[in-house]
Amino acid sequence: GESVGLHLPTLSVQEGDNSIINCAYSNSASDYFIWYKQESGKGPQFIIDIRSNMDKRQGQRVTVLLNKTVKHLSLQIAATQPGDSAVYFCAEKAGTASKLTFGTGTRLQVTL
Amino acid sequence: EPEVTQTPSHQVTQMGQEVILRCVPISNHLYFYWYRQILGQKVEFLVSFYNNEISEKSEIFDDQFSVERPDGSNFTLKIRSTKLEDSAMYFCASSPFLGWTTGGYTFGSGTRLTVV
């Protein structure tokens, strides 16, 4: 069945370093992907999204890369800050389906 | 910035009781959703709602669950007879369109439901 999963449950990085969070998906029909940040006790917060007709999209300090050949998605955070500490989820959607399928999440810990 | 508002933030209920979770989606959004997150697990889709009817639901969304848009602003999730395993964080979300849309889906801060 379709699934979205994350390789690393916890990622620890030093403040100022770049972070890379990875996500694998198995539904080849997925054509829209979103990265969410979730802080403790809060709802998922949109970070960046990408459509399947793109392989890279940049935002402020964040970049999402999509490799459809291997069904892999990554989130790069430049100059990681303490405020970036949170759980990061990738989510995907396929065609006209309305639901988002979330991955299991990666906890990013930023050390000083 | 527009936001999705959920009430209450925390609800404790006895097993077998009915609960209603409330949400006010963003005003110009047309699609509404409920998701849940059991502690420490991933966010799971429950149901999507458009034009006053369910457009998609998951296998989690059984006969114990129902959704309603009772007026022009509220969107509710009802659980008729709560079970211990219904304890979770419930998130409401909304989006302006179906399909991809820059900015994704906007989520509320959630209602933590504890069934005792």
Image (cartoon, grey):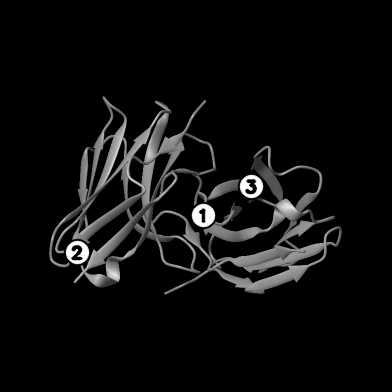
**Amino acid on which disc 1 is placed:** Gly
For the residues carrying marks 1 and 3, which lies nearer the camera in this image? 1
- The residue labelled by disc 1 is B40
**Amino acid on which disc 2 is placed:** Thr
Quarter of the rendering containing residue B19: bottom right
Quarter of the rendering containing residue B37: bottom right
Q: Is residue A59 visible?
A: yes
Residue A103: x percent and y percent? 43, 43
Q: Which mark is residue B46?
A: 3
In the foreground, A12 or A74: A12
Residue A48: x percent and y percent? 31, 54
- Quadrant of the image for the N terminus of chain B? bottom left
For the residues carrying marks 2 and 3, which lies nearer the camera in this image? 2
Q: Which mark is residue A80?
A: 2
Left or right? Give the position of B100 relative to A68.
Answer: right
Instruction: Please rate how many residues cluster around mark 1, counting C-alpha atoms within 10 Å: few if below 14, some from 14 to 19, many from 20.
Output: few
Q: Chain of mark 2?
A: A
